[in-house]
Image: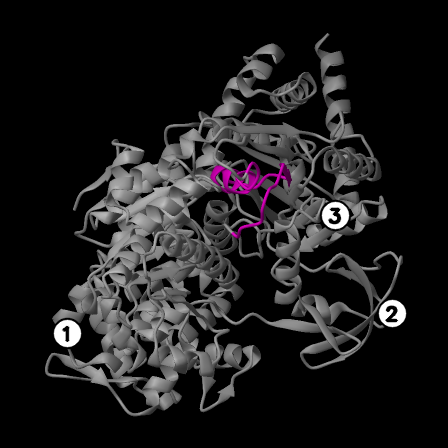
């Protein structure tokens, strides 16, 4: 298997030489010359080579992928050899993107046909079709009779199409498979797709083309795209895009400026930026922040501004996207829903409110501006506290230098495997080894053990009849196949990896306007006012999974918007912030400004922050660890300054807390952030230095597994895994099972699965340890600690680096009143202490 980066660019003349006359003439008239990704990729795809293309938005990478396929279809059409077959398959993680591509494909084809007519070339029609969960039964039946030559679909719809007895026959002719936004599929959804592609490869011989924004390492993503024992060429032209990234703060003093003043200055800054640019795209890290920013900017008189996030209705999102494309909006505020490559037209500036927590996400978001290849992508990251300022400075520096965090691809997911085994059983009778070898061709299953594979087969064959879980396949004499007529229906209705979420629909005058999370709806009282879609609504009542509201023009929200998980800091970026902390004390303000491209105000703020920490305690960095201990009126705090990201800290803190609670026979509370964690004990319990040494010598993974046995996350994640693994059916016999019922069933089954070490219980633990938490990097850091100096400090108050961890009450960067007051009080105490200490030293 050879994965290599392409060094050779082909000339325009060489590429034109392989194009059919109508295609060549059309391209010359419309574009004149090829873009860098096209110069690298088109010829290689024409030669039937697997290719991964990583290039900026607007660089022509989609056409790079499609041009060879379109050219071949035009060639077949000219020679009257175009049959009723699917020749090219385009897979995207977004249904909205599929609709976009349909438009973007049909327009070039229409133009090529017009050119062909001028040239006197007679062409048969090339059909483009979309097949997703939105496609009607009537449209699907039409496709069976007359399939599109280019099929656009999602990973889930492909897995269903593979098992459609009639439609799957059309898949056998596929020659090109294009996987778009592959960086967004480095999750269980992508693992599911990797197995679908191997199953498709059994019946069709095709070229794989992957399209990606900024992702690292590209070699890993290339292996993920093509599977094991296949070659792939990498086209990396990200370095050609000129990117300008700045980290700023809305105010000079992030500690003592009142939060309403910070908020006022923030919105004033945003207003000025929006007014200076034609179209500004503003990213927040939560949906609640998105709603709040839209609300406040509208109150400042900003016109033509909209919210865009996943809880808004599809109609609203499409309307916003359409207005963006037409250049009708001055600004759009989004959480994550506009990160992917939907064609949203020309954006002048991208503003990130708070750190996006990873370099790849920052480049992805900022890459939405300067849509064309030779336009500069301009981004501003706004920091809201001193940790954020340091983080954004390092992140911007890494982004400018294209130092990107590593991608995580889940491995050996047994729940996803269950789905595909059932799907495969619907195709034919399989020899066990034949099926095992096919599964292991998918990159995420390269090291799948035969034992795990057989455990999955045995579970699917035997079920757990005493628990009303019945077999889905038969298994005997080294073979397996489908069991019963209902298996096909079970597969169709339950396939996919995205778990059911509990959300509540919101209606205004009987019209659906969006949805909120269940926890938010439970807290609503009649008369409460909240923001949705940038507008204010008053809650008037609700029943079941539906609430009713009426518009409340000009009224202020009475309760904060719904809960949303903050993005976790990537491990690679966290390690670089450690190094930054280690060097900053020895750099002058001028050096910081020069090396990290920040203004004097930012450089001074960072320098002062580091000096304060150094004077009061110790600077935790890449060479030394700080554990600080202080006591308040009720509790003892032990703060572990582990700057490794929240996912890795989640793993270590749970294991430490479990060990301490057993050791001290008490409940241990935990507070976690990207920068460390605090173990909080009752006032009558104390950790000795020997206890600390013990903590650093525990078996981290085994202790963590024990701690999870009594954790809420295990029950929730087991429900997800059990539904993916067809142990709990979300839909059966035309009936849908509520999430509450699914959860109840999961909790009834988990004890049995734990006792029998069931493959789905093992998968639940793997998912929590590797995908939700970050056990590998947690273990990596614990190894690094052995070569670091550990400082233990008993302090009268938390150190400056601990302020944010202690003030975890606020979860939204836009609303920070309580958090701000607490940090201000802590800072005053520390500065008073340092002043007194300095006086005594004199």
Which residue bears the numbered disc 2? 527
Residue at 67 percent across and 16 percent down: it is 600
Residue 466's x, y, as percent?
35, 90
Question: Dots 3 and 1: beta carbons under 8 Å?
Answer: no
Q: Which residues are magenta?
A: 342-370
Q: Nearer the viewer, residue 784 or 433?
A: 433
Residue 498's x, y, as percent?
47, 67
Which residue bears the numbered disc 1? 432
Residue 125 drawn above or below residue 547:
above
Q: Nearer the viewer, residue 722 or 831?
A: 722
Callout 2: SS? loop
Whole-Å distance between the Cαs marked 3 and 1? Answer: 56 Å
Which residue bears the numbered disc 3? 293
**Circle count:** 3
Whole-Å distance between the Cαs marked 2 and 3? Answer: 23 Å
Verify whether residue 365 appears in magenta.
yes
Q: Is residue 740 left or right of residue 241?
A: right
Residue 665 drawn above or below residue 170:
above
The part of the image, by quadrant, that contains residue 85 is bottom left
Residue 382's x, y, as percent?
66, 35
Q: Nearer the viewer, residue 203 or 577?
A: 203
Q: Nearer the viewer, mark 3 or mark 1?
A: 3
């Amino acid at each position: 298997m050879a994965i290599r980066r392409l060094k050779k660019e082909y000339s325009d003349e060489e590429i034109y030489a392989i194009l059919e006359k109508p295609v060549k003439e059309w391209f010359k008239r419309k574009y004149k010359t090829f873009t860098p990704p096209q110069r690298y990729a088109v010829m290689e795809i024409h030669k039937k080579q697997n290719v991964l293309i990583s290039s900026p938005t607007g660089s022509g990478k989609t056409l790079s992928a499609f041009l060879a396929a379109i050219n071949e279809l035009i060639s077949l059409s000219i020679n009257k050899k175009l049959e009723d077959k699917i020749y090219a398959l385009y897979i995207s993680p977004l249904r909205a993107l599929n609709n976009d591509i349909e438009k973007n494909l049909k327009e070039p084809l229409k133009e090529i046909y017009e050119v062909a007519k001028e040239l006197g070339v007679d062409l048969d029609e090339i059909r483009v079709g979309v097949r997703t969960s939105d496609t009607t039964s009537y449209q699907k039946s039409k496709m069976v009779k007359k399939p599109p030559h280019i099929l656009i679909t999602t990973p889930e719809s492909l897995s269903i199409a593979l098992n459609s007895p009639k439609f799957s026959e059309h898949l056998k002719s596929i020659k090109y498979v294009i996987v778009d936004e592959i960086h967004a599929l480095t999750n269980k959804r992508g693992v599911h797709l990797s197995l679908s592609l191997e199953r498709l490869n059994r019946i069709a011989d095709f070229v794989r083309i992957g399209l990606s924004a900024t992702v690292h390492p590209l070699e890993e993503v290339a292996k993920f795209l093509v599977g094991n024992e296949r070659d792939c060429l990498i086209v990396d032209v990200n370095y050609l895009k000129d990117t300008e990234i700045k980290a700023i703060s809305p105010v000079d003093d992030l500690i003592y400026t009142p939060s309403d003043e910070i908020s006022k200055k923030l919105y004033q800054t945003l207003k000025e930026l929006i007014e200076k640019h034609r179209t500004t795209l503003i990213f927040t890290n939560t949906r609640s922040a998105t709603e709040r920013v839209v609300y406040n900017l509208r109150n400042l008189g900003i016109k033509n501004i909209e919210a865009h996030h996943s809880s808004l209705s599809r109609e609203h999102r499409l309307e916003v996207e359409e207005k963006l494309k037409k250049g009708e909006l001055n600004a759009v505020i989004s959480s994550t829903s506009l990160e992917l490559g939907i064609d949203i037209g020309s954006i002048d500036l991208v503003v990130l409110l708070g750190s996006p927590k990873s370099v790849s996400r920052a480049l992805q978001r900022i890459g939405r501006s300067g849509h064309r290849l030779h336009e500069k992508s301009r981004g501003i990251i706004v920091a809201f506290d001193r940790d954020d300022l340091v983080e954004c400075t390092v992140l911007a520096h890494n982004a400018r230098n294209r130092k990107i965090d590593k991608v995580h691809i889940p491995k050996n997911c047994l729940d996803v495997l269950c789905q595909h085994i059932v799907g495969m059983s619907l195709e034919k009778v399989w020899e066990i080894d034949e099926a095992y070898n096919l599964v292991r061709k998918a990159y995420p299953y390269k090291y799948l053990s035969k034992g795990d594979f057989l455990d999955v087969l045995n579970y699917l064959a035997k079920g757990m009849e005493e628990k009303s879980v019945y077999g889905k396949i038969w298994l005997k004499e080294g073979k397996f196949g489908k069991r019963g007529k209902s298996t096909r229906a079970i597969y169709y209705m339950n396939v996919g990896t995205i778990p059911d979420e509990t959300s509540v629909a919101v209606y205004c005058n009987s019209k659906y306007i969006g949805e909120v999370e269940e926890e938010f709806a439970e807290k609503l009282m009649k008369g409460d006012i909240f923001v949705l879609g940038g507008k204010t609504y008053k809650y008037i009542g609700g029943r079941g999974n539906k609430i009713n509201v009426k518009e409340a023009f000009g009224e202020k929200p009475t309760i904060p918007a719904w809960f949303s998980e903050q993005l976790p800091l990537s491990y690679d970026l966290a390690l670089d912030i450690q190094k930054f902390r280690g060097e900053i004390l020895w750099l002058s303000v001028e050096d910081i400004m020069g090396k990290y491209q920040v203004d004097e105000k930012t450089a001074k703020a960072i320098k002062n922050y580091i000096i304060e920490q150094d004077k009061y305690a110790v600077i935790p960095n890449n060479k030394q660890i700080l554990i600080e201990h202080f006591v308040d009126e009720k509790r003892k705090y032990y703060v572990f300054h582990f700057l490794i990201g929240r996912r890795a800290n989640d793993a270590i803190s749970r294991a430490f807390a479990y060990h301490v609670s057993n050791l001290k026979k008490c409940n241990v509370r935990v507070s976690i952030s990207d920068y460390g964690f605090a173990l909080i004990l009752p006032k009558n319990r104390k950790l000795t230095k020997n206890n600390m040494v013990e903590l650093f010598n525990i078996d981290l993974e085994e202790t963590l597994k024990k701690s999870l046995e009594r954790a809420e996350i295990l029950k929730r994640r087991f429900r997800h895994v059990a539904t993916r693994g067809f142990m709990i059916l979300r839909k059966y016999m035309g009936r849908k099972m509520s999430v509450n019922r699914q959860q109840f069933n999961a909790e009834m089954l988990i004890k049995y699965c734990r006792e029998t070490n069931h493959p789905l219980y093992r998968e639940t633990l793997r998912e929590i340890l590797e995908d939700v938490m970050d056990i590998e990097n947690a273990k990596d850091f614990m190894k690094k600690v052995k070569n670091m100096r550990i400082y233990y400090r008993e302090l009268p108050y938390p150190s400056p680096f601990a302020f944010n961890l202690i003030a975890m009450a606020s979860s939204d960067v836009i609303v920070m009143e309580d958090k701000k007051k607490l940090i201000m009080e802590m800072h005053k105490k520390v500065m008073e202490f340092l002043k007194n200490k300095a006086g005594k030293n004199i």
